Image (spheres, helix red, strand yellow):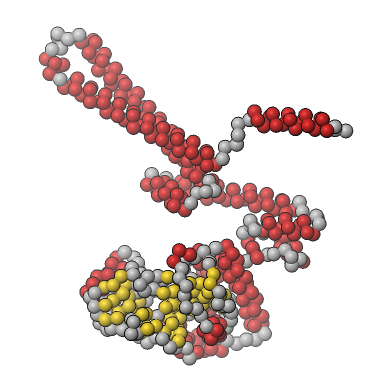
């Protein structure tokens, strides 16, 4: 039996042992030490190079001096030769030392890079600087290979540890198990969640499986589906003119649009039009033509004062690969307030087969501003565009119902439906099966929209099994093959 005195003595012994050990060095402290070492190595290189140049200069002076050339017999040959030889030997030693110091410097930089990526306080700008320096040194490919392996190994180790920790509580009290499972689930990706934890979630609703939902992962898988099957229902609508055909069948208002595509030098000089690249994404290459000397470059947020300047700017779009192909179309310029020359704002509905998840309101003039809405009229932050938010005007129930009803006619779990807000209501803009930078949503939003996606897949499957025909969509598809 252990007495209290024995316990106290043992504890004191442990305290003494711990006090004799050096304190644990944090990742930040390790990084600071490596930075100091890096500074010292770079200083050593600078000093060695300076000394080498000095001795080279002295050697050349000796070799080229008139005294050396004309007074050889009168000089102490051995002494002077010895001095020159010593100088040249010193240069060789300096060069060898310089090479060794440079090797140490590179090794130190690699250690520093590793420490920086392990530093939990490292921000994205610092990561970008490290990557840029690594590329400039011609070591990026090697770094990528090593980083991929280290990331995989690190994630594997953490995943195994969390899996085993969960297994240790499989047969514990339900409330203990559920608490542990909930905490562990928050640290696992969807593909990392083991079957026994998913099974427990099916049997006990108090174990949240929201970590298994991800909008990002769902869209990634959908894109992979497209690669394997070549086409998906929502991607047919990605083509602008085909989307307009579908909207005509549904009786939804859309802008007037040109029937043909133009080269940038062939676009007709018309006022009250929007010029867009045929294969564009976002606002690159989009121009609002109020008049021939009052044109707005949407992406650059600037005014162009002549048609010739517009053509030159479009040429820059092409040469800089902002716009890939010299194919453009024109459409009606929709105003939210024509007297004030205020163009329509964008209203983008994230639709999940008959349900709207969130709505993005965008104003583009005089600068890009964003506002996220829930279907209940609440402002939210999503992790995307958080630095450029504005109050917005809001979305009506009728507008939400319009977007919902359109998406219910498309046999796909997700599609974004974009509108323009005119003075007298919404005007259809385009369908977007893959929103740009959909991976920028924060974790909560990603999981929330992921639930919408999964639930939409379930409803769509049930409707198909129950014989829903999607008549408007089928008729539209048939019209494309004629």
Q: Is residue 438 depicted above or below 463 in this figure? A: above
Relative side of 91 to 369, left or right: left
Can you give x and y, in whole percent of width and height, for residue 473 in the image? 53, 86
Q: Is residue 215 visible?
A: yes
The quadrant of the rendering that contains the N terminus is top right
Q: Position of residue 415 (x, y in %)?
A: 52, 76
Q: Is residue 232 above or below residue 59?
A: below
Q: How many marks?
A: 0
Q: Quadrant of the C terminus?
A: bottom left
Whether residue 242 can be seen here:
no
Which quadrant of the figure has residue 96? Answer: top left
Residue 172 in the image: above or below residue 221: above
> Residue 460 vs residue 395: left or right?
right
Q: Whole-percent x and y of residue 319? A: 29, 65
| Residue drawn where x is 63% and y is 48% of the image | 157
Q: Residue at x 28, y 72 (%)?
A: 303
In the depicted view, which residue is nearer to us: 301 or 211?
301
Residue at the right extreme of this rendering? 1
Q: Residue at x 79, y 59 (%)?
A: 174
Residue 137, given in percent of the width and then of the height, sits at 38, 44
Left of 270 or right of it: where is 211? right
Nearer the observer, 116 or 461: 116
Q: Residue at x 34, y 65 (%)?
A: 321
Looking at the rendering, which quadrant does residue 298 occupy?
bottom left
Nearest the eye: 105 or 342: 342
């Amino acid at each position: 039996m252990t007495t209290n005195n024995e316990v106290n003595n043992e504890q004191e012994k442990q305290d003494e042992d711990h006090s004799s050990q050096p304190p644990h060095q944090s990742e930040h402290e390790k990084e600071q030490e490596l930075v100091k070492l890096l500074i010292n190595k770079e200083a050593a290189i600078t000093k060695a190079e300076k000394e080498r140049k000095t001795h080279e200069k002295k050697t050349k002076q000796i070799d080229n001096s008139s005294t050396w050339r004309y007074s050889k017999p009168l000089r102490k040959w051995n002494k002077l030769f010895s001095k020159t030889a010593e100088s040249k030997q010193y240069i060789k030693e300096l060069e060898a030392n310089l090479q060794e110091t440079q090797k140490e410097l590179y090794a130190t930089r690699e250690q520093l890079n590793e420490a920086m990526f392990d530093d939990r306080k490292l921000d994205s700008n610092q990561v970008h600087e490290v990557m840029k320096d690594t590329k400039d040194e011609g070591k990026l490919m090697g770094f990528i290979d090593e980083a991929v392996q280290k990331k995989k190994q690190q994630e594997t180790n953490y995943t195994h540890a969390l899996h085993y920790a969960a297994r240790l509580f499989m047969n514990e009290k339900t409330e203990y198990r559920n608490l542990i499972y909930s905490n562990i689930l928050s640290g696992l990706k969807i593909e990392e969640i083991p079957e026994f934890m998913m099974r427990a979630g099916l049997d006990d609703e108090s174990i949240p499986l929201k970590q298994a939902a991800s909008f990002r992962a769902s869209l990634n898988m959908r894109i992979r589906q497209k690669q394997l099957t070549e086409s998906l229902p929502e991607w047919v609508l990605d083509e602008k003119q085909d989307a307009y055909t579908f909207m005509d069948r549904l009786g939804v208002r859309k802008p007037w649009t040109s029937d043909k595509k133009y080269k940038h030098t062939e676009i007709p000089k018309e006022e009250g039009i929007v010029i867009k690249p045929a294969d564009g994404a976002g606002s690159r290459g989009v121009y609002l033509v109020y008049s021939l000397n009052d044109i707005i470059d949407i992406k650059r947020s600037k005014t162009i004062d002549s048609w010739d300047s517009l053509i030159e700017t479009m040429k820059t779009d092409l040469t800089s690969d902002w716009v890939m192909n010299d194919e453009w179309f024109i459409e009606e310029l929709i105003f939210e307030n024509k007297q004030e020359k205020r163009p329509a704002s964008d209203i983008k509905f994230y639709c999940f087969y008959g349900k709207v998840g969130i709505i993005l309101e965008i104003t583009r003039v005089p600068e890009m501003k964003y506002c996220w809405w829930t279907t209940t009229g609440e402002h939210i932050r999503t992790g995307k565009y958080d630095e450029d938010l504005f109050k917005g005007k809001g979305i009506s129930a009728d507008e939400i119902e319009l977007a919902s009803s359109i998406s219910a006619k498309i046999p796909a779990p997700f599609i974004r439906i974009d509108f323009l807000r005119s003075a007298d209501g919404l005007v259809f803009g385009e369908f977007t099966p893959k929103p740009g930078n959909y991976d920028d949503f924060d974790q909560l939003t990603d999981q929330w929209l992921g639930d919408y996606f999964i639930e939409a897949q379930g409803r769509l499957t049930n409707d198909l099994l129950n014989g829903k025909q999607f008549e408007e969509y089928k008729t539209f598809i048939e019209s494309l093959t004629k």
